[in-house]
Image: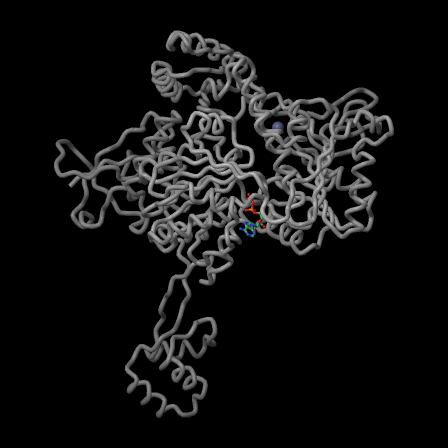
Amino acid sequence: MYANILIQHKIKSLDHTFTYHIPNELTNELEIGMKVRIPFGNSIINGIVLDIFNTYEGNTKDIISIVSKELKLNKELLELGKYIKDKYICTLISAYQTMLPSSLKINNNKESYELQDTYIVLNKDESIINQYINNNKRAKKQIEVLNQLKNTKLLKKDISSSIINVLLDKDLIKYEYVSKYRINKDNIKGDKKELTEEQNKAYKEVDLSSNNVYLLHGITGSGKTEIYMHLCEDVIKKDKTIIVLVPEISLTTQLVNRFYNRFGSDVAIFHSELSEGEKYDEYRKIDKGEVHIVVGTRSAIFTPTKNLGLIIIDEEHTSSYKQENTPRYNAIDIAKWRCNYNNIPLILGSATPTLESMARAEKGVYKYIPLNVRVGKAKLPKMTIINMQDEYRKRNMILSDDLKIAIDKRLQNKEQVMLLLNRRGYSTYITCESCGYTYKCPHCDITLTYHKTSKQLRCHYCGYTAFYSDTCPECHEKTINSFGLGTEKVESLIKELFPSARVVRMDKDTTTRKGSHEKIIKGIENLEYDIIIGTQMISKGLDFPRVTLVGIINADESLNIPDFRSGENTYALLSQVSGRAGRSDLSGEVIIQTFNPDNKTLLNVLKNDYNQNYNYEMNIRKILKYPPFYYLISIKVISRDYNKASLEANKIAELVKKNKNGQTIILGPTTASQFRLNNYYRFQIIIKYKKDELLINYLKKLDEMYISNKDVYLEIDVDPNRL
Ligand code: ADP
Ligand code: ZN
């Protein structure tokens, strides 16, 4: 028997399979999708078995061994890899690598991450044990252990090692290893809520035996999660499984807990903050069919669920469903593929669906399910816009008078406040007021952000750090000053203005350690904090009944991002974070600070008018030929050598122009928005197209052509999130 094996190799053009002979001792065990060790050139490497067959003419080497018998890529996932390769223009091996948790990745040789408990058990018949006991009456402790062992096995760590050693020596006991999971939940199930009339209507619209895509467009607090859980219950009744995707880990905590409370140990979780071992365990639970529900972030879409019955993607508009390195897949596309493969429905939930999704719902491609009221007594918050130009005249640079008064009122009422600023650090740039010197990243050409807590200057692109000093490195005057606004600065001002308030900051800098999200969220839930300051991390999904005021410190931060989606994203961000206010019977208020009080997007947020914002944005997209009217592909041409990058970019643009149809538009090359990154120069070509087989096929060729180019490389992004 022979096998075709896919390997990982630096030169991607080797993305074809190699044939090996299966030695007799492996023929019964080897299956398609397994990881094996093989001789390759002068070395021994790993590969994935893609095919097994009987006859082959030609010389082959033998497969050495199977790396892991327990886990393998199943048929569905093997097929899915081919789709990813085709859709996102990448190699098959990089598709499979992305799909596997790192414990199972091709080059990892560790056979098992299994965690085991060591027990001691009797190794002889009871008559022999009794005889020993009779003959050794003075060994009280040994006798005690032996008597216990007659009824049950004992954990090794609970027994003194000297006793164990004696009994082992006499061959009376032996070790027994029992594997266990790192994450264990009780099997209690409960917390089921009766659906409201509106929820029930939405729930009934979902046909679980269909292959429909549903867009569940429900305002914040309308109870989407409860609907998801009711549907999960129905799927479980059919003994089928569900994948529930959530945008990011900060969000999973609350949602996962709701799922745990409802479905107990029937839930596995899967996200990047789990340890290798935890991921391995959860993956195995899923693979063995021990759980019905998987809740997780983007990569959970690749878990080997058996008998899949439903996929739910919560907050479907979130950019984190798209992976920003190769393969640049979008989990929503993957979900659609898996739903088609299994002939099951997909639910996309959001308070602010993407324009693409809404347009599909309008066309009837998706089934549209609206939810327009908040559950219970909760009402949408009252919103105001504050013109910061007026406040500046009053020397209120960060907080307006109205926001200060509103915060004060909440503190007196023992309610909670959330302040959003989508920019971490203390200030956004540092400059010398004498000579004009500005600190920039030596590798990326952008200004460094000042992080006061750690006294560091950091590049938010590449992670470069330098120490902060108040003396200018150019003119040596002590006239260094920092400008711009980050969450740290807001935090220090708030602490100054409201010294008795308990303040917590939640951004990338305060949540790097494992479990730190959960700790902050628990603290907020337990009312240990009065004021929560954070980046977009605090905007989504979280449900804190005592938050009654949301302040948006600088709405322009997000509006001013030079990207075709910035209006759409700002609307989503601001309505999401506004949705955190007034989620119980306490009424909520939102204050938006801006220098552009007439901005259309902000006015739409104020009116809470998704549809108007949708029409406004769609109009712009149509005129400018952006999605959903056209598809986009961006090609970045990257090199350490400026001239080479520029030259190749021009060459590629010309080549692409020759290999497209008449409707397709090619823009550029121009410099990419992060032009210099980590000492690499980056040019960008943007392609807008509707349907263009010629183009897509050419891009695949182009990608392969550049694989062997050592000086210049391409980054092709199909359906990019941003340009
Ligand atoms: P969304 O995800 O749409 O923003 P949630 O699912 O978080 O909304 O629901 C908002 C709040 O309402 C939660 O605290 C939830 O427990 C509660 N809730 C949802 N549905 C019901 C219901 N049918 N009965 C009582 N409370 C509900
Ligand atoms: Zn940098």
Residue 4, quarter of the rendered image: top left
The residue nearer to you, when weighing 442 against 32, is 32
Q: Pinpoint residue 66: horizontal percent, then vertical percent.
A: 27, 47
Q: How many marks?
A: 0
Residue 658, quarter of the rendered image: top left
Is residue 692 placed above or below 352 in the rendered structure?
above
Left or right of 650, for residue 476? right
Q: Pinpoint residue 476: horizontal percent, then vertical percent.
A: 82, 26
Point out the image quarter for the N terminus. Answer: top left
Coloring scheme of the render? Answer: one colour
Point out the image quarter for the C terminus. Answer: top right
Q: Answer yes or no: is residue 45 visible.
A: no
Query: Residue pushed farthest front?
Result: 197
Q: Pinpoint residue 721: horizontal percent, then vertical percent.
A: 51, 26
Ligand 2 image position (quadrant) = top right
Q: Pinpoint residue 221: horizontal percent, then vertical percent.
A: 59, 44
